[in-house]
Image: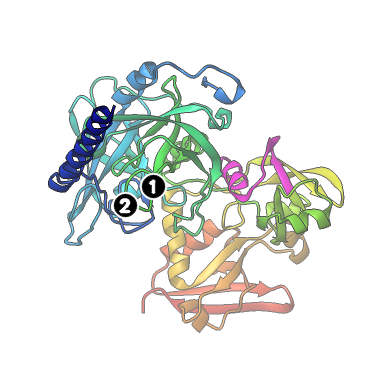
Amino acid sequence: MKNTIGMIVVALLSAVLSIAGYKYFEEPQQVIIREEVPARYTNFEGNSSSSTTMTSKGATPPSDFIKGANKATPAVVYIKASSKGSGEYWWGGGGTGSSTGSGVILSEDGYIVTNNHVIEDADNFEVTLNDNRTYDAKIIGTDPSTDLALLKIKDKGALPFLQFADSDQTFIGEWVLAVGNPFNLTSTVTAGIISAKGRNISILNDQYAIETFIQTDAVVNPGNSGGALVNTNGDLVGINTAIITKSGGYEGYSFAVPSNLVKKVINDLKEYGEVQRGFLGVDIGEVSPEMAERLGLSAAEGILISYVRKNTGAEEGGLKKNDVINSINGVQVKSVPELQEQVARFRPGDKIKIGFFREGKQQTASVVLKNMNNSTKIVTSSTKGDQNIAYELGFELTELSASEKRKLRVNGVKVKSIIRGSKIERTNMDPGYIITKVDDKKVSSIEEVLDRINQAEGKVMLEGVYEDYKGNYYYAFAKED
């Protein structure tokens, strides 16, 4: 018995000594991804910045993702964007002077959607397809407010492309695939589930940024920016845009622009070259629990109106301060990002139905959306260029409302604000001035004012009125100093 116990002790000691020796002499193996910035776009290595499978409703998870992967991968491309200039960029995919990312073919004639930050500041675009065919691409339009861009390539045959899915009909817990073409690796496919919708991660710096991301735990790594998020059928649910990471690698949080918003933005860029953004004309915020209790709401949900701007669609539709918006065209909205996404799907001039809570009662209002100039007119690439003239001169213009025209008995364009130190300020003009003539020619719209100024040579004479003062007022300035 003693001999047996002794043998066991010796065996245990030998095993312990063997393991210790291995640990001492063998180098430990580690895989390290270095990243100093916690939040960034998916193609940045060193920069911050319509059928579904509803597992949440008891559906059986798929046993594989072959169908979705086979359908999606041929339509996802590799994009290299470079600049002819001497400026240097330090972008994760391409190094000095270039950026790389992914893109998604949306039509057989070669329209490709990607992220704006993939092609920003570049003027040469090279697209490589899944089968290694390479094409030069031209830029059709960009929208920094959603971080989307549209490119176009030419091919004699029919290109593979993806169909849009309805992102409103995606659900938390639903399986999705992230398909990209990072670093020209032909394709990568990863699977995960939707873990949240309507996420705002404050990564876009545009003044009118719309962040209402689909959050997923599908693995998305550098180089995947502009790639596809698809359902198990291989239909497009979103465009992969950003990840949140502390280590620089994948940590379970990736974000995609929802397909319904992508579809609207891309259609605008194709048709007009610019996104037609409709505005309600209100200042808004989230509803706090204290505010919900004070207003008699059953939950701290919805969007609180803190201010209604004059002559906007919201004012004309009857919305007031402290109204709580909870639906757009019957679609429930619980947060500011959700409201922004729904409104962003419409153009100036579109009428939408708004559900809101006021003084203990649920009510509805019809609102006609307007553009940033308080007009229902469509903005094109050329008219946007004309609007830059107004900015350079130093004033912001807005259309007169129907009630203002009746009250003042004039047609014209109102000066909404004046930039300090600008040419317009040096004329001693005040905000509120209503321009009725440019160089003695009548004007009744912003487009007409800017067109007259653009055509003028030398000195420009403005004629107009103020609401609270009698008589006409004249201001002159030279287009060129």
Residue at 33% x, 52% y is 247
* Residue in the foreground of this view, choosing between 373 and 353: 353
The amino acid beneath tag 2 is: Glu
Which of the pair 214/260 is nearer the observer? 214
Compared with 44, 219 (above or below) is above
* The residue positioned farthest toward the front in the image shown: 2
**Circles 2, 1 touching at the beta carbon (< 8 Å):** yes
Label whose residue precedes the other's in the sequence (2 or 1) = 2
Residue behind mark 2: 120
In front here: 436 or 308? 308
Q: Is residue 389 above or below residue 41?
A: below
Label 2 vs label 1: CA separation?
9 Å
Q: Badge 1 is on which residue?
A: 142
Q: Position of residue 320 (x, y in %)?
A: 78, 56
Residue 337 lies in the magenta-colored region: yes
The C terminus, quarter of image: bottom left
The quadrant of the picture occupied by the N terminus is: top left
Give the magenta range: 325-346
Q: Residue furthest toward the right? A: 360
